[in-house]
């Protein structure tokens, strides 16, 4: 992995975040505008990144097996991360209900909204595709285990799995089916997908930047004392542990680097939605998301440097 590529990508993303913040200071960014941006990113840009990866990679039997391996690693990783952060919260004697929320904020990374565009920028289209496979593991974990943990009544309903059926997952399925069938898209379709894929990272970073001004305008203190807990686990402890584990198993190469980078992503955007729906602490999630995203502009290059 070229550290210069990582640094330049992160710096550009930081500038995009700043641009989004400046825009939000000058213009009233309503909830409707934010919703439209999220829909465009998740339903158009990110699926385009996935399909662009599929069209650019020769998905032979070996590549498909690698994708399956990444998905399996993702499931095991996310479950282990929840357990690890949960145990740490228990040992630190955080309040039981609050500890559960800190566990989720510290364990779940933004592997889709930011992770897929970033992986595509660093590792190319193949990286974007495998990052999407990794993010599919997060989606399955979120819409089963995490929702179960957040719900007051602690009950799991099969209808919760409907949320797993979304455009990014659909793009993965369509891409794999196209690869298996040997479908060769026309040049015009490839160009169309490439242009849409290029929107993912800029739109995601602009959206993150738009979250800052509303937080700063609040009259009261927005940061909570335990903020260090999810930030330290999300940005440093977990990726460093993953790096060590992969080295112990002699799992090297750019695929291993991609996995570590994905584990170093800031707190997942979906946590704000889940906290809003199942708790009364949406702001806790938003503050953690924004703080972790800003700090990740420093920690991600550091983690990448350690892997050189």
Image (spheres, helix red, strand yellow):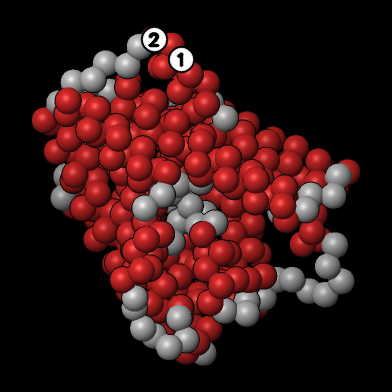
Density class for disc 1 (Cα within 10 Å; few <14, some 14-19, many ≥20) is few
Where 48 sits versus 213, above or below?
above
Task: Indicate the secondary structure of the residue bearing disc 2.
Answer: helix
Report which residue position mark 1 lands on: 191
Residue at horizontal 47 percent and vertical 86 percent from the top: 152
**Label placed on residue 187:** 2
Q: Which quarter shows the C terminus?
A: top left
Where 289 sits versus 206, above or below?
below
Residue 47 occupies quadrant: top left
Residue at horizontal 65 percent and vertical 45 percent from the top: 36
Q: Please tell me which residue lies in front, 93 or 288.
A: 288
Residue reaching furthest to the top: 187
Residue 63 in picture, x, y percent from top left: 18, 31
Residue at horizontal 51 percent and vertical 59 percent from the top: 270
Where 4 sits versus 223, above or below?
above
Residue 261 in picture, x, y percent from top left: 40, 44
* Contact, mark 2 vs mark 1 (Cβ under 8 Å): yes
Residue 122 occupies quadrant: top left
The answer to whether residue 47 of the structure is visible from this angle is yes
């Amino acid at each position: 992995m070229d550290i210069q590529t990582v640094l330049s990508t992160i710096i550009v993303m930081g500038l995009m975040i700043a641009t989004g913040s400046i825009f939000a200071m000058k213009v009233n960014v309503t909830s409707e505008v934010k919703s439209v941006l999220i829909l465009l990113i998740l339903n158009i840009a990110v699926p385009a990144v996935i399909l662009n990866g599929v069209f650019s990679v020769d998905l032979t039997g070996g590549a498909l097996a690698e994708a399956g391996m990444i998905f399996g690693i993702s499931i095991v990783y996310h479950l282990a991360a929840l357990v690890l952060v949960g145990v740490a919260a228990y040992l630190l004697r955080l309040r039981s209900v609050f500890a559960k929320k800190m566990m989720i904020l510290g364990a779940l990374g933004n592997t889709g909204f930011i992770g897929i565009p970033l992986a595509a920028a660093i590792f190319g289209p193949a990286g974007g595709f495998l990052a999407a496979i990794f993010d599919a593991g997060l989606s399955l974990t979120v819409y089963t285990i995490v929702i179960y943990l957040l719900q007051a009544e602690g009950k799991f309903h099969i209808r919760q799995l409907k949320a797993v059926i979304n455009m990014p997952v659909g793009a993965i399925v369509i891409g794999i089916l196209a690869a298996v069938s040997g479908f060769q898209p026309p040049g015009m379709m490839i160009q169309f997908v490439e242009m849409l894929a290029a929107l993912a990272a800029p739109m995601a970073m602009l959206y993150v930047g738009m979250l800052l001004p509303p937080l700063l305008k609040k009259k009261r203190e927005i940061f909570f004392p335990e903020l260090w807990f999810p930030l330290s686990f999300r940005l440093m402890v977990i990726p460093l542990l993953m790096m060590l584990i992969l080295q112990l198993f002699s799992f090297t190469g750019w695929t291993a680097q991609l996995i570590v980078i994905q584990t170093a992503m800031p707190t997942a955007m979906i946590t704000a939605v889940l906290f809003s729906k199942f708790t009364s602490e949406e702001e806790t999630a938003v503050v953690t998301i924004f703080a972790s995203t800003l700090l990740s502009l420093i920690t991600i290059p550091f983690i990448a440097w350690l892997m050189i």
